[in-house]
Amino acid sequence: MAAGTPVWSVDPRTGKQREQVTLEATPADVDAAVRAAHAVRGALADRAVRAAFLRAAADLLDGEAARIVETADAETALGPARLTGELARTTGQLRAFADAVDEGSYLDIRIDRAEASLTPPRPELRRYKVPLGAVAVYAASNFPLAFSVPGGDTASALAAGCPVVVKAHPDHPAASELCAALLRRAAAAAGLPEAVVSVVHGFDAGLELIRHPLVTAAGFTGSVRGGRALFDAAAARPVPIPFHGELGSLNPVVVTPDAAAERAEEIGAGLAASVTLGNGQFCVKPGLVLVPEGAAGDRLAGALAKALGETGPGVLLDHRMRDAFAAGVAERAALPGVTAPVAAGAAGEHAVGAGCLAVPARALLAGGPYELLLEECFGPVTVLVRYAGQDEAGAVLDRLAGNLSATLHVSAAEADGAPGPAAALVSRVTELAGRIVVNGWPTGVAVAPAQHHGGPYPAATSHSTSVGVTAIERWLRPVAYQSVPDALLPPELREANPLGLPRRVTGTA
């Protein structure tokens, strides 16, 4: 790598630099990484080799679990228990994508046989999906493994047959380099060029990457501001490219009056646990909670305040985030009519304390400066909105932008179909979010085929998911072959189906 700015590993518990990890990538470095990835894209064409590569990567990561967890914890303060679970999720994703590659339905093979009797006549058509090419991945701050170098964006792109250049997050450069080295070892073990995965560091490198003419698509997890800048850059290129960004999300929760009356204390305690999980640094943290006015709502708020008050201070991923959290909470708490049942904010020189704010729905609906309460505040805080009736709750929901999740807490009778607002609320929040949760909490996103982790803007910039095997669809494009002789077709589409792939023929399985 050419001479550049040093990249340091920093301990968020102290704010001190630990070690110099590497150098920021220069434009020449980024160009070399992308050109190398583009040059080896054909090496990923063999599905069996790709699957073997993904499994080898999972095995190597598991084999180095202790070193990975220690390195990531030193840079993120997320703790060994959390990081051990995240590593298991990461290697599980890699193996799940390997299984998907073996199975082959992601290719979405469709065959329509020629039919001259139709009007107009139908020619022979065969359709499947092909990889886009070199993909840029922008790693997340809050998941140094599962949404970083070896994470879901990388795994899904590699599974699709696309080489990857990852822009590492500055909060965990040492963990990024360690995981990248293991992925490249796995590539070599599977007989692939190591250039199928590479990593670059630095803010300017991220801009160079999205603008590079050989990058065909990008995946991003991060802030609205950063994601939107990259999204706009992707669209402004001479040849625009897909940009699959996961940005900000408020993840609203609505508690019905009957649910509050039935189990106020349970909901309040569960809300506190969800808000403080990972010190509030989850993209699906519930940040706005609609609670009915009255005695049951008071009990819920009291249970929430009690649980938050018993939560000790924690360290955020870096001091910039800590300062932004403290400033954001203070600005919100200063709004007229906003109270702080449990004060959140700075707790000592390096940590923050969890808390909650409360505001009447009628104040929030006034707009103006209260719009700030409808923006994500990254860290362990949530906003209780006390509503007087369903019309007022609905009016608040109407003010919300797109979200990754929306959660409803309903009574047992409402869950069984008894009259009440539950059914209408499900329909209403479906317009707002990519995942609807009932009588649970949004934190904890299962990696499963039916999962959807995305949502209307600004939760995401596309309608795809970044979690689950269907994330592979982001890095593929369909191609149809019309009246092409069998000998000239790709093996996936030939009549004899030599690869044994699932296919749909003339509309039937």
Image (cartoon, rainbow, N blue to C red):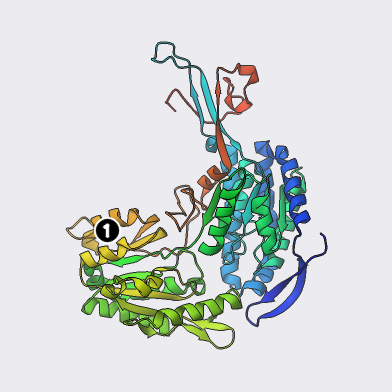
Residue at (58% x, 25% y) in the render: 493
| Residue extending farthest top | 117
Position of 507 compared to 36: left or right?
left
Position of 239 compared to 460: left or right?
right
Q: Residue 64: tell me if it is visible.
A: no
Asked where in the image residue 91 lies, by quadrant, the reply is bottom right
Vertical relation: 257 (above or below) 352: above
Q: Tag 1, which secondary structure?
A: helix
Position of 265 compared to 123: left or right?
left
The residue under label 1 is 425
Image coordinates of residue 35 in percent, x first then y, are: 75, 46
Crowding near the residue tagged with mark 1, few <14, some 14–19, many ≥20 C-alpha atoms within 10 Å: some
| Residue extending farthest bottom | 348
What is the quadrant of the C terminus in the image?
top left
Image coordinates of residue 463 in percent, x first then y, are: 46, 48
Vertical relation: 192 (above or below) 231: above
Vertical relation: 152 (above or below) 39: below
Figure label count: 1
Image coordinates of residue 478 in percent, x first then y, are: 54, 34
Image coordinates of residue 363 in percent, x first then y, are: 29, 75
| Residue extending farthest left | 419
Q: Residue 492: tell me if it is visible.
A: yes
The kind of residue tagged 1 is Leu
Closer to us: 146 or 242: 242
